[in-house]
Image (cartoon, grey):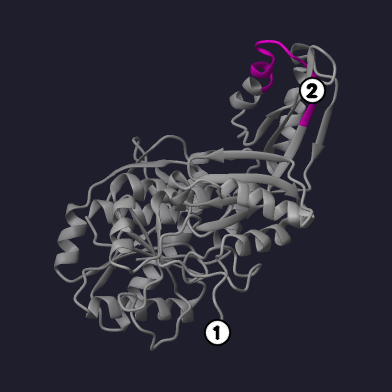
Amino acid sequence: MKFGGTSMAGTERIRRVANIVRKQQARGHEVAVVVSAMAGETDRLVNFCREANALYDPAEYDVVVASGEQVTSGLLALTLQSLGCKARSWLGWQLPIHTIEAHAKARIESIDADELIASMQRGEIAVIPGFQGLSEDNRVTTLGRGGSDTSAVAVAAAVHADRCDIYTDVDGVYTTDPRIVAKAKKQKAVTYEEMLELASVGAKVLQTRSVGLAMKEGVRVQVLSSFVGEDAIPADDLPGTMIVSEEEMNELVEKGEMERQHVTGIAHDKNEAKVILTRVPDKPGAVAHIFEPLAKAAINVDMIIQNVGRDKGETDVTFTVPQADLARAQALLEDKRDEIGFNRIITDSKIAKISVVGVGMKSHAGVAATMFKALADRGINIQAISTSEIKVSVMVDEDETELAVRVLHTAYGLDAKDEAA
């Protein structure tokens, strides 16, 4: 079970979490819980680091920011004990959770889970701080923002758990953002591939890395809400959304528990910016000169269009980068202006990416055509398109984001039916 920062924000909420955990143990489950720091706490600790030393040492930064989860794991263990449960906290170095690569964005390599499993078999609830581990040189490391989801999936894989329940402030994965489309439906199950695509194109439910790890290790993940009443039904009886393999999804469809859908969800992301380089020489190697410096600077390029040149021998190249990297990308390209040979750079950060995702696209033609027609009928202009096997993304004006999402949700028949109908 994993609980995020909003679920751990203060003693009242921690008591509520303790009751949810206690109910699962009372049903005969062996339980390990991964917790995040209290909401806002990591930001506070990061600011302390910046104030102490603007050019801070990443290893000491990790020592400071990892303390947020240490506090919540101890408090949850204490609260569980007050409810009569046997519980203890396990810090990242006590398990240990071995990590590799850089501080502040480490990756979990392995977990020594023998002692943890023995403790759970004795009926102890294990409370584990998320987001942290131990480097090869025995220093505390952290896994980057949203890292507690990854911690939870890694612990679930290490103890061969039946399920990894991720409690968050939403009660499942919806066909789209319910704040934009009131008729968005909660999905009973979504495949790993679909969830990976949804997470990477703007759905904020799960961290992309945690979904990738779950897929690799075959961990069944369930997304549910921790904001349920004290007397709520346990997760086993009131499921959120299960993230499962394609084989398990096919079984659910065959049993009649799931409808076969071509499109699973529609995500949007306003954190993209468009870059146009005009009058690039239309010759071999020209495009490589544009994207090599961006790749070296670890700037992620998403959509790319090369227009047919207006004059012979020249072409315009359009692409998107994350909004946060726009200024850096612009500076790098200006630096290489002579080498690339473009005329000018035009940028636009008032754009949004709308993505339609679904495993059903592999075997069903016409998903993209439906998208283009539905947007055209409402006068929404498509500025760029990118596709993968189970995703079609388009770039539109930021002002048209909500309208585009609603139009597509209806076009693919995803709107929930009125109960009365």
Q: Counting residues from the N terminus, which is met first, the one under dot 1 or under dot 2?
A: 2
- Quarter occupied by residue 30: bottom left
- Identified by mark 1, the residue type is Ala
Q: Which residue is mark 2?
A: 334
Observer-nearest residue: 403 or 319?
403
Q: Position of residue 58 (x, y in %)?
A: 52, 40
Q: Dot 2, crowdedness within 10 Å: few (<14), some or many (≥20)?
A: some
Observer-nearest residue: 390 or 88?
390
Q: Which mark is residue 12?
A: none
Q: Position of residue 371 (x, y in %)?
A: 63, 51
Q: Which residue is mark 1?
A: 421
**Span highlighted in magenta in the image:** 276-290
Task: Please indicate whether residue 179 sits to the left or right of residue 226 in the image.
Answer: right
Observer-nearest residue: 396 or 91?
396
Q: Position of residue 71 (x, y in %)?
A: 43, 65
- Quarter occupied by residue 183: bottom right
Observer-nearest residue: 102 or 166?
166
